[in-house]
Image (spheres, rainbow, N blue to C red):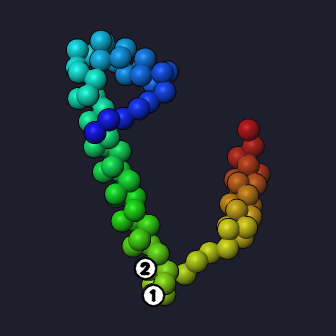
Amino acid sequence: MEVHVAPELAKKLSDLAATTGRAPDEIVQDALAGYLEEVSSLRETLDTRYDDLKNGLVKPIDGEAFFEQLRQREENLLKRHPR
């Protein structure tokens, strides 16, 4: 498989390879493996949370209401502990 990257990224990869003494393809393989693992884990988490919402195991919250509550808590904390 061939992967084409922007010249700036190729330079960074080349510099890292020179600094670490590792081959560029090893660095790319490690980075890609880590990235794919992270994406897979995130996808699994999102699927599980979606299923929980769909099945009624958790209730959605209103985003605006949540942030308003957060702002209120911050205001209360600042009133009690002024800077």
Quadrant of the drawing holding the N terminus: top left
Q: Give the alpha-carbon distance from disc 2 to disc 1, as whole Å.
A: 6 Å
Specify the amino acid type for callout 2. Asp
Q: What residue is shown with label 1?
A: 55
Residue at (47, 75) in percent of width and height:
50
| Rendered position, 13 above or below 35 | above
Q: Which mark is residue 9?
A: none
At label 1, counting other C-alpha atoms closer than 10 Å, the crowd grade (few under 14, some 14-19, many 20 or more) is: few
| Rendered position, 18 above or below 67 | above
| Rendered position, 43 above or below 82 | below
The residue at the far front in this view is: 2
Q: Is residue 24 left or right of residue 61?
A: left
Q: What residue is shown with label 2?
A: 51
Residue at (23, 14) in percent of width and height:
21
Residue 57: quadrant of the picture: bottom left
Is the C-beta separation of discs 2 and 1 under 8 Å?
yes
Whether residue 69 can be seen here: no
Q: Is residue 24 left or right of residue 81?
A: left
Specify the amino acid type for callout 1. Asn
Residue at (62, 75) in percent of width and height:
61
- Check disc 2 and report its element: helix, strand or loop: helix
Whether residue 19 can be seen here: yes
| Nearest the eye: 75 or 58 | 58
At label 2, counting other C-alpha atoms closer than 10 Å, the crowd grade (few under 14, some 14-19, many 20 or more) is: few
- Give percent across and percent down for residue 39: 38, 53
- Check disc 1 and report its element: helix, strand or loop: loop
| Nearest the eye: 66 or 76 | 66
